[in-house]
């Protein structure tokens, strides 16, 4: 299906191809499903659902169940353990993509074939073409993208498992294509030491500042982290630019080698200029100052990433924020055809050749489900905290039958062995581009806390707290109620828990032993999943904070919500707070604050 030829074709005729794809969305979907079924009806997984001679496509929706990762994990494990027969897919599975979603505390492994991997590479090209078409001047310079890789993992059968982006950055198609228009040398992107990689990429971005027309990263959180790194390292970066000498701690030979052709001579004037800009007390608009030719900031800023919008707007000083695409390890969903729309108005258009999509209607009457609404300050927000759940209802519909204004959970059938697979993301359909649905990203089901790529659900949080509070019970201390929020006012952000504690048998505030309370923090963090722990270890999330509040504080919180219109009879304390006022209220009842050890993992 896709290959070098198709990718070349995209470069030449991308916009026309996009028109064709979206105009024939339904037909393309039907063809894709048919092809997947014809090729894979004989696999161990699918053959169970079809009687010999049956029309597979006709019976697909009645016979093949909608599944989640845990349902197909046994099949995936067998492939990872070396079974080669066509278990899920007729073609060989060539690698796994590690998703940030977790299963039993480990990253989910999503199967991938050579063909589906190649096909996905079309997306960044289309994104690039659309951006260049809509934003003038983007084709007249370089993109300062901050890209990073993560170490690969080998399965027992010798198949590699890596993040999609890590695999993509290693392909010739990236190296010979988009990478040529990026400031960062490929070896600095591929450096496994993220700190050295970040330093070299920032140094290159500064050295080539006059050529930079676009700055970005895959997710907004990465860009926020990079700016924090710049705050910490700008003096050293300036010193390297002034002397023409790369800091000794950049020890990675490939990075040093790559930098030797960029940092070629002392540039004291450039160093002075950057120093002058960075010395300014306020960094408002710093991106514009440092990279005067930048036309846009390109980074996903929807869903949980919307928490970074104020920060990026502050640093950007008016440069448009572009949220380019939406997808997951399982499949690419869509791209943004109106890159200049405001972050909260971003809709993505489904690319019908990326997977066969079905949409499970979701009952979303909680109001204010998405953080978008919350940040806009819509009144529905406050009550949503007590009903912060979506529930899936009804049968799935296909792409042609989604309704504008409705919420759906995405279900994909892919070119690599996933059949009617629930990705977990919820989308709101906002319209159609030609015949292809457009949607706003809402959020994963039941996610309550999120920083960077971590997504902690209500269940994760409750399990962790149930374990931690066991430490308090022998001391006669009771946890009466709790809540939490993701504090991203500082970088890196942290999760903050509020616990209302009292002595058994009285309402007295217990005497709090710092060591024991810190132990509780540690147990909570220990109980979180692999993604949380990896991000915490990498310094992307900082130590969890536990704020103990005095007896009665949560009653005041209830009064607060009731005053905002919540019903007393249905009130349950929000497991995660999104309103600043509510956080302020709980803070006012605080009698102690405790942190996990800084280096836990
Ligand atoms: P992963 O499978 O680890 O690549 O994570 C993919 C997840 O990131 C998706 O399932 C979404 O929850 C989230 N995501 C991807 N694209 C977007 C987007 N444009 N806006 C918000 N969240 C996104």
Image: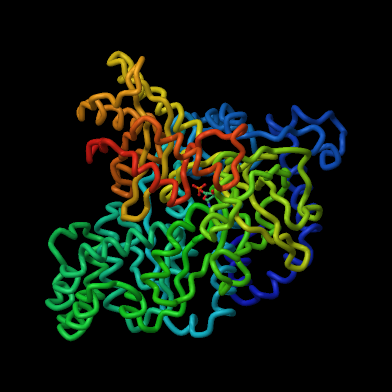
Image quadrant assignment for residue 437: bottom right
Residue drawn at (50%, 38%) of the image:
558
Classify 238 as above or below 543: below
Image quadrant assignment for residue 276: bottom left
Classify 135 as above or below 462: below
Classify 48 as above or below 578: above
Q: State how the image is colored.
A: rainbow
> Is residue 412 at all visible to an observer of this figure?
no
The image quadrant where one finds the C terminus is top left
Q: Position of residue 322 (x, y in %)?
A: 51, 69
The image quadrant where one finds the N terminus is bottom right
Q: Nearer the viewer, residue 45 or 337?
A: 337
Image quadrant assignment for residue 91: top right
Q: Nearer the viewer, residue 86 or 353?
A: 353
Q: Position of residue 529 (x, y in %)?
A: 41, 34
Left or right placement of residue 344 versus residue 1 in this view:
left
Q: Nearer the viewer, residue 2 or 107?
A: 107
Q: Position of residue 69 (x, y in %)?
A: 58, 34
Left or right placement of residue 127 versus residue 148 in this view:
right
> Is residue 574 at all visible to an observer of this figure?
yes
Report the label total: 0
Residue drawn at (63%, 59%) of the image:
334
Q: Nearer the viewer, residue 39 or 69?
A: 69
Left or right placement of residue 401 versus residue 506 in this view:
right
Q: Position of residue 586 (x, y in %)?
A: 38, 42
Classify 278 as above or below 54: below
């Amino acid at each position: 299906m896709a290959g070098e030829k198709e990718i070349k074709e995209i470069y030449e005729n991308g916009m026309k191809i996009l028109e064709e794809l979206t105009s024939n969305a339904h037909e393309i979907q039907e063809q894709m499903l048919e092809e997947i079924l014809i090729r894979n009806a004989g696999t161990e997984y699918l053959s169970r659902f079809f009687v010999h001679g049956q029309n597979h496509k006709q019976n697909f929706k009645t016979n093949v169940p909608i599944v989640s990762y845990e349902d197909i994990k046994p099949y995936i494990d067998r492939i990872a353990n070396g079974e080669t027969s066509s278990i899920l897919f007729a073609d060989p599975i060539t690698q796994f993509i590690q998703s940030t979603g977790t299963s039993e505390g480990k990253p989910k492994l999503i199967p991938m074939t050579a063909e589906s991997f190649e096909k996905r590479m079309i997306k960044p090209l289309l994104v690039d073409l659309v951006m260049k078409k809509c934003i003038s001047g983007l084709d007249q310079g370089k993109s300062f993208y901050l890209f990073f890789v993560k170490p690969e993992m080998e399965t027992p059968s010798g198949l590699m498992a890596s993040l999609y982006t890590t695999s993509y950055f290693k392909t010739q198609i990236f190296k010979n294509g988009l990478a040529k228009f990026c400031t960062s040398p490929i070896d600095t992107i591929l450096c496994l030491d993220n700190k050295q990689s970040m330093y070299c990429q920032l140094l290159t971005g500064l050295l080539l500042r006059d050529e930079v027309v676009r700055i970005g990263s895959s997710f907004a959180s990465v860009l926020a982290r990079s700016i924090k790194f710049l705050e910490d390292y700008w003096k050293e970066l300036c010193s390297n630019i002034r002397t023409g000498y790369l800091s000794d701690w950049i020890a990675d030979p490939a990075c040093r080698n790559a930098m030797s052709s960029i940092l070629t001579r002392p540039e004291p004037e450039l160093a002075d200029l950057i120093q002058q800009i960075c010395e300014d007390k306020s960094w408002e608009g710093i991106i514009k100052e440092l990279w005067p030719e930048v036309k846009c900031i390109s980074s996903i800023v929807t869903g949980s990433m919307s928490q970074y919008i104020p920060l990026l707007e502050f640093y950007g000083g008016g440069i448009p924020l572009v949220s380019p695409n939406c997808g997951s390890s399982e499949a690419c969903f869509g791209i943004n055809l109106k890159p200049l729309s405001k972050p909260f108005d971003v809709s993505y258009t489904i690319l019908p050749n990326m997977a066969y999509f079905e949409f499970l209607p979701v009952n979303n009457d909680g109001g204010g489900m998405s953080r978008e609404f919350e940040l806009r300050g819509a009144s529905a927000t406050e009550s949503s905290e007590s009903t912060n759940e979506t529930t899936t209802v009804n049968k799935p519909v296909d792409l042609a039958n989604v309704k504008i204004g409705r919420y759906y959970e995405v279900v994909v059938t892919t070119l690599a062995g996933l059949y009617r697979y629930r990705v977990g993301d919820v989308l709101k359909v906002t319209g159609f581009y030609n015949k292809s649905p457009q949607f706003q990203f809402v959020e994963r089901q039941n996610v309550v806390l999120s920083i960077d790529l971590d997504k902690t659900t209500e269940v994760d949080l409750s399990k962790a707290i149930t374990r931690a509070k066991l430490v308090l019970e022998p001391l006669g201390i009771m946890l009466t109620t709790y809540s939490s929020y993701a504090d991203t006012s500082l970088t890196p952000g942290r999760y903050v828990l509020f616990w209302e504690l009292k002595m058994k048998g009285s309402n007295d505030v217990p005497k709090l032993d710092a060591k024991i309370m810190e132990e509780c923090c540690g147990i909570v963090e220990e109980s979180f999943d692999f993604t949380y722990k990896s991000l915490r270890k990498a310094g992307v999330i900082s130590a969890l904070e536990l704020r103990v509040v005095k007896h009665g504080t949560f009653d005041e919180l209830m009064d607060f919500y009731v005053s905002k219109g919540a019903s007393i009879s249905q009130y349950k304390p929000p497991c995660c707070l999104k309103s600043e006022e509510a956080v302020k209220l709980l803070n006012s009842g605080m009698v102690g604050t405790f942190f996990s050890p800084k280096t836990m993992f």
